[in-house]
Amino acid sequence: MSSLFVWIFVLLYGGGVAEAINTQQRSNITAMSSQLKDLVKYLQIKNLALSEELSWWDTEMIKLEEEILELRHSHQNLLKSSRKEHGRR
């Protein structure tokens, strides 16, 4: 008879422990889910900021390439002028 009480106590107590562990695990999962959502939001904002910065750098690169082309054109014109001057002398 006492072993029956022991089994009942073990089942009731063990069930309570299992439920407490389940509740704690659910709480941990909820907290982790919230943290992951916050992390995703942060990364989306960071991604947007980096995309905007990349776009700015692309624009600057295009400006520099145009400036390089203008300088090359000016350089070629100067070389032509210089050759003409040397040819006249």
Image (spheres, rainbow, N blue to C red):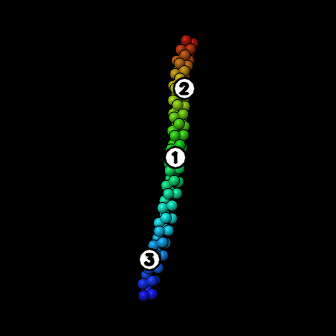
Q: 76 or 61, which is in the foreground?
A: 61
**Circle 2 sits in a helix, a strand or a loop, which is it?**
helix
Quadrant for the C terminus, please: top right
Residue at mark 1 to residue at mark 3: CA–CA distance: 44 Å
Q: Position of residue 78 (x, y in %)?
A: 55, 19
- Disc 2: which residue: 67
Q: Earlier in the sequence, mark 1 or mark 3?
A: 3
What residue type is disc 2 on? Answer: Glu
The label number, if any, that marks residue 11 in the structure image: 3
Task: Using the rendered image of the protein, determine whether residue 12 is visible from the camera's viewpoint.
Answer: yes
What residue type is disc 3 on? Answer: Leu
Q: 2 or 63, which is in the foreground?
A: 2
Quadrant for the N terminus, please: bottom left
**Circle 1 sits in a helix, a strand or a loop, which is it?**
helix
Pointer 2 local density, CA inside 10 Å: few below 14, some 14–19, many at least 20: few
Residue at mark 1 to residue at mark 2: CA–CA distance: 39 Å
Q: 18 or 1, which is in the foreground?
A: 1
